[in-house]
Image (tube, rainbow, N blue to C red):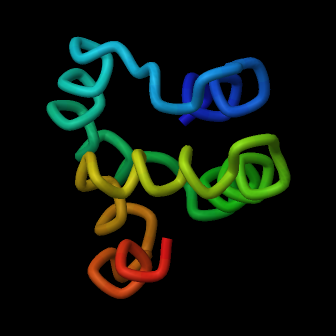
Amino acid sequence: MLKKRFFGRLANDNTAYDKETLKAIRENAKGLQSISGERLWVELKRIAEGRNAGPVLKTMLEQDTGQYLGIICFLILNIL
């Protein structure tokens, strides 16, 4: 999540994600279960307040992280 937050703040092109990084996020998303809900909320809030928030959140959810963040992805992806 930290990588996504900083990418959202610093990236000029919010579609220039490294394919290997996205693969690693997908493969390790289950690890989010071990992080406290409060910590997840703090990081999500920072992402949402950051630059490129919509594209960053959409890309995160496309990597199947929503189920570990308490987000119903199919609804949100249709909105973003």
Residue 80 rendering spot, x and y as whole percentages:
49, 70
In this rendering, is residue 39 above or below 24?
A: below
Figure disc tally? 0
Q: Residue at x 44, y 64 (%)?
A: 69
Closer to us: 29 or 39? 29
Tell me the quarter of the picture where residue 17 sits.
top left
Q: Residue at x 38, y 46 (%)?
A: 32
49 left or right of 27? right
Q: Residue at x 60, y 54 (%)?
A: 40
Residue 18 rendering spot, x and y as whole percentages:
34, 13
Residue 59 rendering spot, x and y as whole percentages:
40, 46
Closer to us: 80 or 64? 80
In this rendering, is residue 73 above or below 6?
A: below
Residue 5 rendering spot, x and y as whole percentages:
67, 34
Tell me the quarter of the picture where residue 48 sits.
bottom right
Q: Residue at x 68, y 33 (%)?
A: 8
In this rendering, is residue 6 above or below 73?
A: above
Residue farthest bottom in this picture: 75
In which quadrant will I find the N terminus?
top right
